[in-house]
């Protein structure tokens, strides 16, 4: 694993491009968000998705993977048509610590073993991810960096992350100590928006 330090408010663009080039070539990465650290790869990297599941010892459905997108326009490229009410809600809360579950389109489904009909989407309020997105060939697909051994454990300290995953992950983006609260999850696949999990993001 290579550990690369970034300032969370003014990340170096040249270094971000170098990291993005490696992700575009198939490497997997641990990175900070506006909630907890996440483990991810390019959405189109089927081998990377399988590798992430092996690292966390989870099946794809258990991993609860989400797309990390720079804006709602990009999200709409990977989902079925977004309802007007859902769109307004997304505009209100994003970017921020929220995951919206939407119906995926056929393009997304072909990269998953179980023809994933729903996909979580996120626009984190994080300048490192904003800068990285400029150079990626596709959105990141990611899952929260945690383990479950009786008690669910979140990784917030880059030193501990490096020690635990140094032999299994290619890159660690160190953006400082992470949060220990997950995103708020809103299911938008039914007629009404349903709160699935209340996390860091507040809801009315």
Image (tube, helix red, strand yellow):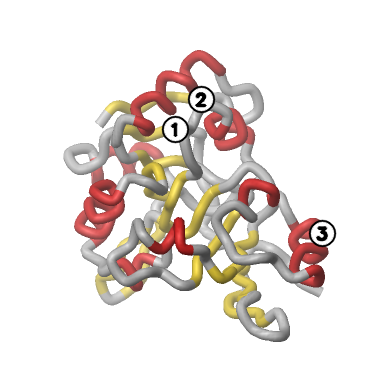
Residue drawn at 31 percent across, 40 percent down? 28
Locate residue 62: give its quadrant: bottom left
Q: Quadrant of the N terminus?
A: top left
Secondary structure state at the residue bearing disc 1: strand
User: Looking at the rendered structure, which numbered label has been put on residue 92?
Assistant: 3
The CA distance from mark 3 to mark 1 is: 29 Å
Of 135 and 1, which appears nearest the observer? 135
Of marks 3 and 1, which one's residue comes earlier in the chain?
A: 3
Local packing at callout 1 (Cα closer than 10 Å; few below 14, some 14-19, many 20+) is many
Q: Which residue is mark 1?
A: 174
Q: Residue 66, percent across and down? A: 48, 58
From this viewpoint, which residue is outermost toward the left? 167
Q: Nearer the viewer's eye, disc 3 or disc 2?
A: 3
Of marks 1 and 2, which one's residue comes earlier in the chain?
A: 2
Q: Residue 179, percent across and down? A: 54, 52
User: Looking at the rendered structure, which numbered label has been put on residue 6?
Assistant: 2
Position of residue 16 in the picture relative to residue 124 (left or right): left
Position of residue 36 in the picture relative to residue 93 (left or right): left
Number of marks:
3
From this viewpoint, which residue is outermost toward the front? 106
Residue drawn at 60 percent across, 70 percent down? 185
Q: Quadrant of the C terminus?
A: bottom right
Rendered position, 96 above or below 8: below
Local packing at callout 3 (Cα closer than 10 Å; few below 14, some 14-19, many 20+) is few
Rendered position, 31 above or below 15: below
Residue drawn at 36 percent across, 34 percent down? 172
Of marks 3 and 2, which one's residue comes earlier in the chain?
A: 2
Secondary structure state at the residue bearing disc 2: loop
> Do the CB atoms of the residues marked 1 and 2 lie less than 8 Å apart?
yes
Of 131 and 110, which appears nearest the observer? 110
Rendered position, 85 above or below 99: below
The CA distance from mark 3 to mark 2 is: 28 Å
């Amino acid at each position: 694993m290579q550990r690369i330090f970034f300032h969370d408010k003014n990340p170096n663009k040249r270094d971000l491009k170098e990291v993005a080039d490696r992700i575009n070539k198939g490497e997997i990465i641990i990175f900070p968000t506006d909630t907890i650290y996440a483990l991810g790869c390019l959405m189109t990297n089927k081998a990377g998705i399988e590798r992430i599941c092996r690292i966390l010892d989870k099946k794809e459905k258990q991993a609860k993977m989400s797309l990390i997108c720079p804006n709602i326009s990009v999200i709409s490229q990977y989902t079925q048509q977004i309802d007007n009410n859902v769109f307004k809600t997304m505009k209100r809360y994003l970017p921020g610590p929220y995951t919206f579950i939407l119906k995926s389109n056929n393009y997304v489904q072909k990269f998953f073993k179980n023809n994933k009909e729903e996909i979580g989407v996120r626009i984190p309020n994080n300048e490192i991810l904003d800068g990285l997105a400029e150079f990626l060939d596709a959105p990141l697909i990611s899952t929260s960096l945690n383990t479950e051994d009786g008690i669910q454990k979140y990784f917030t300290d880059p030193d501990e992350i490096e020690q635990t995953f140094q032999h299994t992950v290619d890159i660690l983006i160190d953006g400082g100590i992470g949060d220990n609260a997950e995103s708020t999850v809103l299911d938008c696949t039914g007629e009404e928006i349903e709160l699935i999990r209340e996390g860091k993001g507040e809801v009315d």
